[in-house]
Amino acid sequence: MIEHKVHASPAKDMLARADQLAWKMAEVSADPVAVESAVAEMIINRIIDNASVAIASLNRGPIKSARAMARSHPRKGGATLFGIPAAEEFCAEWAAWANGTAVRELDFHDTFLAADYSHPGDNIPPILAVAQQCGRNGNDLIRAIATAYEIQVNLVKGICLHEHKIDHIAHIGPAAAAGIAALLDLDNKVAYQAIQQALHCTVTTRQSRKGEISSWKAFAPAYAGKTAIEAVDRCMRGEGAPSPIYEGEDSIISYILNGRTSRDQGGSPYEPYYTVPLPAPGEPKRAILDTYTKEHSAEYQSQALIDLAFRMGEKIDDFDTVESIVIHTSHHTHYVIGTGAGDPQKMDPHASRETLDHSIMYIFTVALQDGSWHHVDSYTPARAQRPDTVRLWHKISTREDDHWTRRYHSHDPAEKAFGARVVTTFKDGSTLEDEISVANAHPLGARPFGRAEYINKFKTLTDDILDPSESSRFLDLVQKLPSLTTEEIKALNPVAPEGYLTENELRGIF
């Protein structure tokens, strides 16, 4: 890997293209290096994973809205939608919009956490939609997805958006654009402009994940994917982008991220910079292997704590004997989904599903009491408003612990952790204490996910929806991904049985 030092540059310096991060990402996109078999196998796993959660969410509100919008944009020779027969085709950007929303709705697909947050599987819907519309085969799709994961994971390693309250979809835009450029074998100049346009148009604030969280959380990554497709289309037609998008005097680093020249504690000026790793020419794109999926439908930083709650709950006979529960955890967990966020909605029994999904206090309570977690049942209003649950929920707080913050940010995969130490104090003064570093499904966890677990997740979420023959058809097809033809790529979205889909009855503009 090459560690690229990225910082703001005054306009008068005329930063050369070859020295700009967007150009370096374009070079990675254009590199024809072969995809390793382990990477190709993991890409298959993640396509299965995406389909699992997308099919399970087909009749949820945001998906019905997104699907209605996509169905207003039919196109012969276009892309297909989750749940809809492949004979019906739609404009690729709108298919990406609908499919991306379906993948994201349940907050139940893959994740990578480092300097920032990410769900790199959000890149798959736009890339697959373009592959279907532009007649690409399985090998093309694999190379493109490997590229998008490589770009997004390494941006997440190097650039923290959350610190400046910018939503993490700003890393999806350039990653998806780079993946699509790889899919279509675009030259560096076109890819460079598309990456810049996609970033410029996907910088939004984290209010989408703060306070009363709305359904926009599900739409946001799909918006980034749709925007990336449109950016690539414009740049293929010869259009350009704001340049240099990262380093420019009035651009992302200068005014949204760490800024231009600053002064240290002694008053001396220094140039703030980011370090973004990218593969050297000819180096395999392996970043997808650093990512991990979810066993539970909840924000990733709660995955290990759900597993811990199952374990601790078995040792508590009467939850009303609990005086307090303190979760000692990382800075990010405390301030994003813990009491450090200062969001009263995170303690509100009437909060939205999206808000409850970002309340570790609620999640830990339900997992502790039920000893299980369900993508629907664990979030129902009746479940959230149960009096004994509310009593226990309001006894839970989080605290930042330097040990867990350090491990969260560690660059050593063996040390990196997303867990916590939990101290339960009972009314008689006794305590119950336990800790966990990574979720059971994590590659270093008690039960790491492999192909069998991905298939089991797919079946668990879709067996009561899909016909058995359709489930088998999809699973058989996706596992042959490297050899799939352009026609077979069209059939990669599972189809719901006739009469299953319900639609949004409200009319919009389209």
Image (cartoon, rainbow, N blue to C red):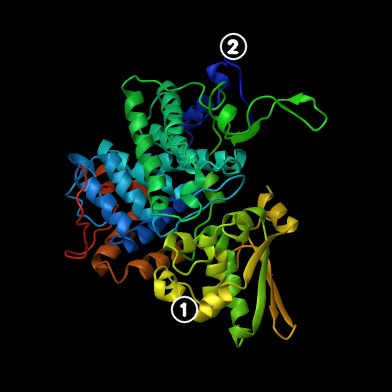
The numbered mark at residue 293 is none
Q: On the picture, is 46 further left or further right than 305?
A: left
Q: Is residue 448 visible?
A: no
Q: At numbered mark 2, what does the secondary structure look like: helix, strand or loop?
A: helix
Nearer to me, 169 or 254: 254
Q: Residue at x 42, y 62 (%)?
A: 352
- Residue located beneath label 1 in the image: 386
CA–CA distance between discs 1 and 2?
Answer: 63 Å
Q: Residue lying furthest bottom in this view?
A: 317
Front disc: 1 or 2: 1
The number of callouts visible is 2
**Residue at numbered disc 2:** 12
Classify 405 as above or below 468: above
Question: Where is residue 364 shown, x and y percent of the image?
Answer: 56, 70
Q: Secondary structure at mark 1?
A: loop
At label 1, counting other C-alpha atoms closer than 10 Å, the crowd grade (few under 14, some 14-19, many 20 or more) is few
Residue 353 lies, in percent from the top left, at: 42, 63
The residue nearer to you, when weighing 76 against 104, is 104
Residue 189 in the image: state x and y as whole percent: 43, 21
First-in-chain label (1 vs 2)? 2
Q: Which residue sits at x=34%, y=44%? A: 128
Residue at the farthest right position: 266
The amino acid pointed to by label 1 is Arg
Residue drawn 58% across and 31% down? 280
Whether residues under marks 1 and 2 lie with C-beta atoms below 8 angstroms apart, the answer is no
Drawn side of residue 47 relative to residue 7, left or right: left
Mark 2: few/some/many CA within 10 Å (<14, 14-19, 20+): few
Q: Nearer the viewer, residue 351 or 70?
A: 351
Q: Give the residue type that dot 2 points to.
A: Lys
State the image coordinates of residue 12 (x, y, percent, origin top left).
59, 11
| Quadrant position of the C terminus in the picture | top left
Viewer-nearest residue: 207 or 168: 207
